[in-house]
Amino acid sequence: MADVKLSEVAAALGGTLADERDPVITGVAGLEHAGPGDLTFVAKRALLPRLAECAAAAAIVGPDMECELPAIRVAEPYAAFAAVLERFAPDPRRIFPPGVHPTAVIAPDADIAAAAAIGPYCVIAAGVVVGAGSVLGPHVILEADVLIGADCVLHARSTVRERCRFGDRVTVHPGTVIGSHGFGYLPGPDGLTTIPQIGIVRIEEDVEIGANTTIDRATTGVTLIGRGSKLDNLVQIAHNVVIGENSVVAAQAGISGSTELGKNVVLAGQAGLVGHIKLGDGVMVGAQGGVTKSIPAGTSVSGYPAREHSFARKICAATARLPDLLKEFRNLQNRVDALEKGNGSGSSAEDD
Amino acid sequence: MADVKLSEVAAALGGTLADERDPVITGVAGLEHAGPGDLTFVAKRALLPRLAECAAAAAIVGPDMECELPAIRVAEPYAAFAAVLERFAPDPRRIFPPGVHPTAVIAPDADIAAAAAIGPYCVIAAGVVVGAGSVLGPHVILEADVLIGADCVLHARSTVRERCRFGDRVTVHPGTVIGSHGFGYLPGPDGLTTIPQIGIVRIEEDVEIGANTTIDRATTGVTLIGRGSKLDNLVQIAHNVVIGENSVVAAQAGISGSTELGKNVVLAGQAGLVGHIKLGDGVMVGAQGGVTKSIPAGTSVSGYPAREHSFARKICAATARLPDLLKEFRNLQNRVDALEKGNGSGSSAEDD
Amino acid sequence: MADVKLSEVAAALGGTLADERDPVITGVAGLEHAGPGDLTFVAKRALLPRLAECAAAAAIVGPDMECELPAIRVAEPYAAFAAVLERFAPDPRRIFPPGVHPTAVIAPDADIAAAAAIGPYCVIAAGVVVGAGSVLGPHVILEADVLIGADCVLHARSTVRERCRFGDRVTVHPGTVIGSHGFGYLPGPDGLTTIPQIGIVRIEEDVEIGANTTIDRATTGVTLIGRGSKLDNLVQIAHNVVIGENSVVAAQAGISGSTELGKNVVLAGQAGLVGHIKLGDGVMVGAQGGVTKSIPAGTSVSGYPAREHSFARKICAATARLPDLLKEFRNLQNRVDALEKGNGSGSSAEDD
């Protein structure tokens, strides 16, 4: 992005300049990283003193914050900062040159929208459809009969197996595998027989999927990632899982087969869910939480096995007291022993 | 697959029609997903009522189950359903077109069986052997001197590093890395020195390996995945691990260096094993279980640190009572305090 | 490597032959795997008897160890063995043929050092710099403006997104993704808005990164992997994480956003760290440990939530006694009940 004056950024954000100072902005960065020319932001008053040690040229601040630096005042500094990041992001045409790279292998009957960009060494099989404005980085593989909506971004090496379907504005990061074979076997006398997985994966619009994540196709029917949901890196989604709208799955979390998540569910990092359970709307699972049964809507859980979060915290606090409790318990047993002997002598005294 | 009459499916499965109805079947799907024309199945009597809400054309049911729909009776409905899935699976020739794609880079001295299929942009290095009937999806990489048996399927982007060896009928899903460098370092005054890993990985026949899984080569000798074993997605197998026959490793589980698993071992999702231990035949490790020592054959374990499963369940149940126990303990202490004072006053009363 | 006499290996290691025997060595292997012609090693006296069952031609042993086989004596047998592994490792020119493969797609303005090796189907975008002696395996992708130092090794399919920077002698294993988009979203009334991630990843010299690992670029600024640190397979490093020098992150561990590790930190397998915390120099986190707050330098922690290791062990031991404790507690309650009644009857006796 070309350099801009602070007042131009303020106008774009719907904010106001704090005073008459109006420097030129050459970049954008968080408080810890901002250098000369950068625009930074302060979302909490408590962080204002850190501006003194920051080389930034200007800051985005909240309505009532005093600021030594030239500043833009807005209602929500963090959201405004996120918006301005977009303006300073690198030119996507440098990352994804327009057009179809001559090395892409595209089946004759594939239907690639004229406005799509296809990177080097992509492989697009028979029956694939790629919508207008979608861009494929290098080495993307779309197997037979895959449907990709409009304005999707598939980064390097993402792989979509046959017949899976994407809505519009889906973003997939490098190395992700969508539509791999579900993990289903029938035990028998000669070992394990593979159960064919003939369903698909459907990714609804505005979903984002992280790097090296894996989403298995359904045995029959559909593994579904609902509209607006976001999956981080190295996430595992098993066959026939259903994720509702606007849910968030952090890195290295895993969901076992046929489990269903409602809307606005949040799984923190490394959480794990057993198969065939349901998590209601708005459920939150803490980091490394291990969910072994269905969870009603609106509930936060954590720990293994996952329990309601405030109860899980009480258990955690209590376990920390357990080593002492054991000692105190022995002590109390001894005191009761003594009392019993004392009573006994008391009784015997009464017997006397 | 072409449409078939129910009676033809029944004959193929060795089952019998429940009555004279013999509709045409156009697809196959589980109870939740079945639509008009689909053949579904009911393995448990308790699920029979759900057929009323299902649009399926027919069902596979057990010997004694009454069924409103046209039906095939068999001894094992789920196994029969799995068998019929195979018949309705998509044509593999559409996924893996036969022949060697002209973009594949194949070393002159590589030995590719005439009947193998090699996808676009595969890279096959010097000394590689690929057996008859094996198929490589797009972008598969076989480094120098890799040996692949007959009738293997290596999906898109799977990568096998130098000198590793596959038996027959091995299936590898997309993005998997086999034969990567084991994680071994020698600490020294100048930091960590990498220990060269000059061993290999050997995958025995009928093994299946999930997407984006990683299996490290041995320091010396062999990292071994035994005949018929199945590994899910995002699994980590470290150097010199040995997995016996027909074992199952679910998604995101990890096995540290030199640990050995017997036959028919099952690791549930996100389980983790420390290095240099042995799990006997038939050991089962629960989801997220953390195994810190060797486990004798036939034992089920769970939790962290993993303990015998029924004991681990007792501990879990007991920890849930721990917050209350702490309160009750304080209460009991107070009662003992009172008793001691009462005794004391009793004593002093006696002294009177 | 050509066959060598044991005396030549001894000279290279600065060791001495145990006696006049000086066989020809044709390979190198650990005790369990050594066959005829192999050189093996024994680091601990307790393992010496296992040489009797080992077909090795010779062994590397410690200064005072008696050994039936021809032997080299050195101060540190394991370190000497690691050194000799290097000499028997396969010829890297067979894995990475020198020169630029004709199928590599290289932008006209990319700057590839003359001595670099670039594998088949690599994609090197505009503005990339690759230093002297660096080798890229097949299918490596370097997006726009990536800088790679000298003598780096990027194995098959490793992907580096735009503007990320590597120091010298960095090794990256297959399938790794560096510089993917950080996982940041702003919740709003219409769902989650993606926060652009315009920072980079910087990998300092002598770092090694395992297969299918993911390292996210910073929101602004830098995600940093410090000099000499080693990351295993399937590790997740979130945006703005900082890892100090010579730290070790084992397989499937994950570090959440903006968390900072000092020098010589060790995370065992499947450990997880929440965001925005600091781990001081030399901190060790046990396998599956879940770190929820900052940890001072030199501390070992384990468990969930992670606590100082010896305390965590006490808690673990105590939880194993918890089921019995609950029974004993009920018993003690009953005894106190009886005492109270006894006191009561005692009192009433006194009243009599």
Image: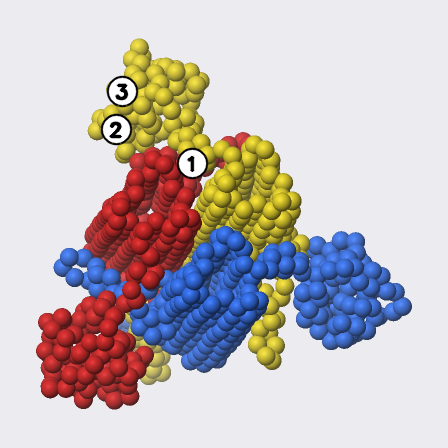
Chain colours: A yellow, B blue, C red
Image-based side of B25 in relation to C2, left or right = right
Q: Quadrant of the N terminus of chain A?
A: top left
Q: CA distance from mark 3 to mark 1?
A: 34 Å
Front residue (pair C230, A119): A119
Q: CA distance from mark 2 to mark 3?
A: 13 Å
Q: Where, by quadrant of the figure, is residue C68 drawn?
A: bottom left
Parent chain of label 3: A
Q: Residue at x 49, y 55 (%)?
A: B104
The amino acid type, in three-letter code, at marker 2 is Gly
Q: Look at the numbered disc 1 and give the secondary structure of its residue.
A: helix
> Picture coordinates of residue A17 (x, y %)?
35, 15
Badge nearest the viewer, 3 or 1: 1
Q: Residue at x 31, y 23 (%)?
A: A26
Parent chain of label 1: A
| Residue highlighted by disc 3 | A69
User: Which label is found at residue A95?
Assistant: 1
Q: Few, some or many C-alpha atoms within 10 Å of disc 1 (few <14, some 14-19, many ≥20)?
A: some
| Residue highlighted by disc 2 | A35
Q: Where, by quadrant of the figure, is residue B73 drawn?
A: bottom right
Front residue (pair A239, C123): C123
The amino acid type, in three-letter code, at marker 1 is Ile
Parent chain of label 2: A
In the rendered structure, are the residues bearing label 2 and label 3 in contact, judged by CB atoms less than 8 Å apart? no
Q: Look at the numbered disc 2 and give the secondary structure of its residue.
A: loop
The amino acid type, in three-letter code, at marker 3 is Leu
Give the vertical position of B18 relative to A148 (above or below): below
Q: Earlier in the sequence, mark 2 or mark 3?
A: 2
> Picture coordinates of residue C313 (x, y %)?
30, 66
Q: Quadrant of the C terminus of chain A?
A: bottom left
